[in-house]
Amino acid sequence: MGASGYIGGEALRLLLGHPCVEVVAATSGSNAGRPVTSILPHLARLTDLDFSADIPPEQAAELDALFMALPHGGAIERVPRILAAAGNGGPRGEGPVVFDMSGDFRVKDPATFRHFYKLEQTAPEWARAAAYGLTEWNRDAIRETRLVACPGCFPTGALLALTPLARAGLLKGPVVVDSKTGSSGSGKEPGEGTHHPTRSQDFRAYGLFSHRHKPEIAQELDKWLPSGTSASLTFTPHSAPMVRGIFTTAYAFPGRAVSTAELQEIYEQAYGHEYFVRLVDTPRVAVVTHSNFCDLNATTDGEGTIIVTSAIDNLVKGGAGQAVQNMNVAFDLPEQTGLTFPGTIP
């Protein structure tokens, strides 16, 4: 649903190539009745579907999986009706597994959601029940739910970088997350943030203290902290002159000396067995572009400062690819299925 946008189109591309998936419908309210390939010409010969305007709840309730890439507010309206049509009284009931790639169910607190999204959370019970789809850290919850709130692109890079430190009790001081994103992160509709002539030779910060991904990052870090404590988080996003990718630099001040050996052990325990998180010397956006990999490095000065850098593709690991990874987990498929393609250089 919402298949003509950047995230929805990327999800459709990945699902059409997935060996265990049959795509039976793709919606686009503004392109209903048109061939999918008239809007997404790179999918020619991969599908002969036409866009539908919508999927009635009764029809959607009969599907195995439903991917939502609607504008914020669209999933809040539809998910309860779809799962009610399936006779679903709770997160483990009947009906499809919904993978929502908007922000509608990521933030648990309705007041926080209202403040940052300027929308009313009319389905708070589903926001509470939704599994947060940061795959590497929430597999059990993803397997048990009917609704997966797939993370935002900035939170994916930041949380993969910082969660090992939170688990190790090393987020006792201030946490600073400084992220740079490509123009595709702002969506398909052109604007000052995406229009090439205004962006290609520019670099700027935006959304200071107000970006909607800040509470999502803080919420998920707080899960690992002692009860009653919260991360002291400063998050600053930047608009970079590239199309795809997010590069994150995270700073932590744990209040004690942390050796290189200790830090390496923390990250090896966290990600040494993970396929899609690679511990590297120098994360680079160009290396992970178009892939589902996150490249990550953690460095300490040995005194009291830790810097963690990560690089992801915002539309794949930070969007549709992670949603497909969550689908593989939810349906007990090998997690890498349909996602083992590398990045592209140059």
Image: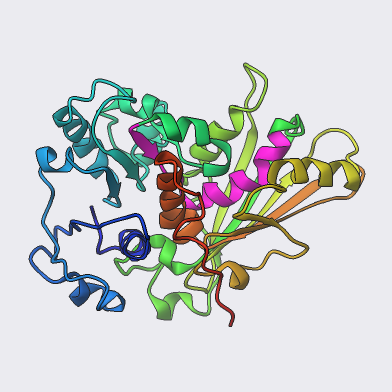
At x 48% / y 53%, what residue is drawn? 153
> Which one is nearer the viewer's eye here, 266 or 111?
266
Residue span colored magenta: 146-166
Q: Please say if 227 is above or below 287.
A: above
Judged left or right of residue 167, residue 342 is: left
At x 51% / y 68%, what residue is drawn? 341
Is 66 a magenta residue? no
> Which one is nearer the viewer's eye here, 34 or 305?
34
At x 19% / y 38%, what residue is drawn? 78
Assign the magenta stretch its main secondary structure.
helix
Is 147 a magenta residue? yes
Judged left or right of residue 56, residue 69 is: right
Q: Please say if 270 is above or below 187.
A: above
Quadrant hosting residue 80: top left
Residue 273 visible from this viewpoint: yes
At x 60% / y 44%, what residue is drawn? 159
> Which one is nearer the viewer's eye here, 70 or 23?
23
The x, y position of residue 43, in whole percent, is 29, 74
Judged left or right of residue 256, residue 46 is: left
The x, y position of residue 167, in whole percent, is 70, 31
Q: How many marks?
A: 0
The x, y position of residue 99, in whole percent, is 34, 44
> Which one is nearer the viewer's eye here, 40 or 273?
273
